Image (cartoon, rainbow, N blue to C red):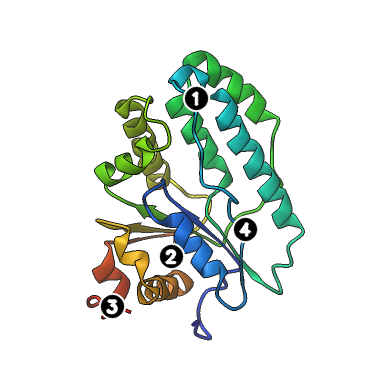
Amino acid sequence: MTSPTAPNRRLIAIEGLPGSGHSELAQWIGDQPGWYAACAEQPVTISGGGRASLLSPLLQILLDRFEWMQGLVGADLFREQIVTDYIFETHLLWAKSLLSEKDWRLYQKIAAVITPPPTSPDLVVFLQAPEEELLDSLRLLDKTIDADRWRELITSFNHHFFAYENAPLLVVRTASSVWLGSDSAKSALMQRILTVRGAKTYLMGEADVWSGGRPTAD
């Protein structure tokens, strides 16, 4: 799937919000020969019945990510390639967008002392889906959270990756995550992931992924 001149991709992070298809893509890549998925065991779960009571589930996300990052330290990156469905720092985007000012200040104090070992991905892939599609998925996490808060989270993700410089970045803008439902689609995108070069690259959905159109359905 790679060429002799392809960049060395030993640790890849697939990021995105629920509804973008990022976790599904990461798990699929992890099932390919020579790859291992170090992904969240459970999807992001937000449940509190209101903005003021979200501190506990968001802190759990922070602790889970810390444990996952700790596990990467013992991984043999020379024997297997690893894909994750997150980068550690985006937990802050969730907390800042959804917590009250009081809880956000407390969250920052706790997060400041939970520092994972330095592990930089060789490539970060951000799946950027349209706002309305993401809203439909985000509202399922907690229907009591105001839609403006979810929009703030979507905007913060977009801004974060627009300015992202911590690792090479591939942004895939797509009108829907449905096209990732076939193995041929995921294979084509994985090929681009493994061969893309440069500090920041944008693909505008299916046409760019295949560089000339959609394959036939599986």
Residue 168 located left or right of residue 118: left
| Residue 19 visible in the displayed image | yes
Q: CA distance from mark 2 to mark 3?
A: 31 Å
- Label of residue 198 in the image: 2
The tag earlier along the polypeptide, 2 or 3, is: 2
| Residue 125 visible in the displayed image | no
Helix, strand or loop under label 3: loop
Helix, strand or loop under label 1: loop
Helix, strand or loop under label 2: loop
Disc 2 residue crowd, few under 14, some 14–19, many 20+, Cα 10 Å = few
What residue would you read off at disc 1?
48
What amino acid does circle 1 point to?
Gly
Helix, strand or loop under label 4: loop
Disc 1 residue crowd, few under 14, some 14–19, many 20+, Cα 10 Å = some
Q: Residue at x 51, y 24 (%)?
A: 54
Q: CA distance from mark 4 to mark 3?
A: 29 Å
Q: Residue at x 48, y 50 (%)?
A: 165
Residue 81 horizontal/vertical position (percent): 62, 70
What residue would you read off at disc 4?
38
Residue 25 horizontal/vertical position (percent): 45, 63
Q: Residue at x 30, y 41 (%)?
A: 136
Circle 2 or circle 4, nearest the eye: 4
Residue 180 located left or right of residue 10: left
What amino acid does circle 4 point to?
Ala
Q: Is the residue 115 above or below the residue 99 in the image? A: below
Residue 132 horizontal/vertical position (percent): 25, 42
The tag earlier along the polypeptide, 4 or 3, is: 4
